[in-house]
Each structure stands twice: as C-alpha cells, then as structure tokens.
Image (cartoon, rainbow, N blue to C red):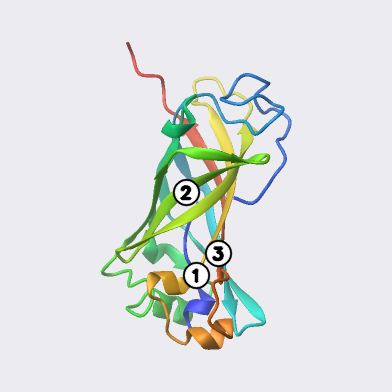
Amino acid sequence: MSSFAQSGLALAAALFVLPAGAPSAGEGPESAQGAILPVPGTYALDPPHTFVYFNAQHKVIGLVRGRFDKAAGTIVVSKDLAECGVDISIDASSLSTQNPIRDADVKGPDFFDAAKFPAITYRGKGIRRAGQAWVLDGTLMIRDVSQTVPLEFRFNGVAPAEPGKPERVGFHASAATQRAQFKMTRELLGEIGKVSKAPDVWIEIDAEALRAPPAKQ
C-alpha cells in the first residue's frame, strides 16, 4: 500500500449556498444577486474552527481521506478585487490519516519531508468571478516546490454578533492538483493507473475567520 495515496496535499472551495444571517445586498464588494464577500478588511483564520481536508486517489479505484490539524493565516477583502488575497500556512507535521504508520511515512522524505520543510503555504492576490463563486489563482508551496493551484471559494456568511468580540465570518473552499507536481512520485502509477493530467488529490477547506479592528486614522 503506497503512502502518499493514503495522504495528500493541503490546502484553502466547494460550492455552498449563502445561509440566513449573511450580509444583505451592498454590504460586501458584490450585491446579493451575485457572489458576495464580507465587509472589506483583514480577517485572521480561527485555527480551532479551520479544517483542511484532502482526498487522495488510491489504487485507481479508491480514495484515502486525511486532514491537516494546524493552519493559520489571513484573508484580505477589498472593494478592489485585485487587492483581495490570502496568506495561509499549514503545519506539515499536523497531517493525520488516522493511521500512525502511514502518517509517519507520508511526513517522511519521499513525500512532505516535514522535518526539513515544516510549512506548507498558500498565497495569492486578486480574485475573479466564476458564476456564483470566486476563484483565486494562488501559489501552493510544498517542500520548496511552488505551483499555481486555483482555489474556488464562496463566502458562507456572518455569525450572529457577540458583544465585545470580533466579527466572525465563514468560507468554504476547494481545489484539486496532482501529487507529481510536487515531486511526490513514489509508486505513483500504481495509485493513479496511467500518466494523466487529471487531478489525483482533492482539497476541501471549511474556515472561520475573525475580522481585525479597523486601523485608527
């Protein structure tokens, strides 16, 4: 049983519907008739409420599911879509597939090499519309290998206000890539079956983020 197929990548959009309590038309950079965003500002990910999952193709016919338990970073929302962006870091050693032997192998030199490259990062600036969602063409870096990996996301709304606490917003995001792009090729053909440009790793992110207070003038 190969290791990476029993693991996967990181990083933060599947589609979702805007729930009750989300901003009304005009609050974000787009109206409620299209994809909307939160009120402009800087939002810090809330680590206990940010979940990074992955599915990796296994033996052609199956999937192995896993997650990364530690992620931190910021999301910038602007009325100028070119200025919107993310800067996210994921702890490679926090990978879990609920199998300690497999996890140790996937964190090792053939795959994430977490001891040498402890951080997986995703950074990008500038977003574009894609129907009712948004797309960020950000850069995913794993073990010093950087690739452009589009992230599709939707704003999931604003949590009910809590006095004295920062505004809390939610996002759901998804992306897809190939492990070979990051030089993770051990036993690859046994996992994907044939040389292909199709994705073999799928990423899904559910994130909550807290709005930073506006800068004092």
Q: Amino acid at mark 2?
A: Asp
Task: Give whichever of 165, 198 is nearer the camera.
Answer: 198
Callout 1 secondary element? loop
User: From where the camera sits, is residue 99 visible?
Assistant: no
Residue 156 appears at what percent x and percent y? 64, 38
Q: Which residue is mark 1?
A: 178
Circle 3 crowding by C-alpha within 10 Å: few under 14, some 14–19, many from 20: many
Q: Amino acid at mark 3?
A: Phe
Total marks placed: 3
Q: How far is mark 1 from mark 3, CA to CA?
A: 12 Å
| Dot 1 or dot 2, earlier in sequence | 2
Residue at 32 percent across and 78 percent down: it is 109
Circle 1 crowding by C-alpha within 10 Å: few under 14, some 14–19, many from 20: many
The residue sitting at the left extreme is 116
Residue 1 appears at what percent x and percent y? 53, 88
Residue at 53 percent across and 26 percent down: it is 167
- Location of residue 169 with respect to 66 vertically, above or below: above
Q: Quadrant of residue 27?
A: top right
Q: Which residue is mark 3?
A: 54
Q: Which residue is mark 2?
A: 137
Q: Amino acid at mark 1?
A: Gln
Q: How far is mark 3 from mark 2, CA to CA?
A: 19 Å
User: From where the camera sits, is residue 91 visible?
Assistant: yes
Circle nearer the viewer, 3 or 2: 2
| Quarter that holds the C terminus | top left
| Dot 3 or dot 2, earlier in sequence | 3
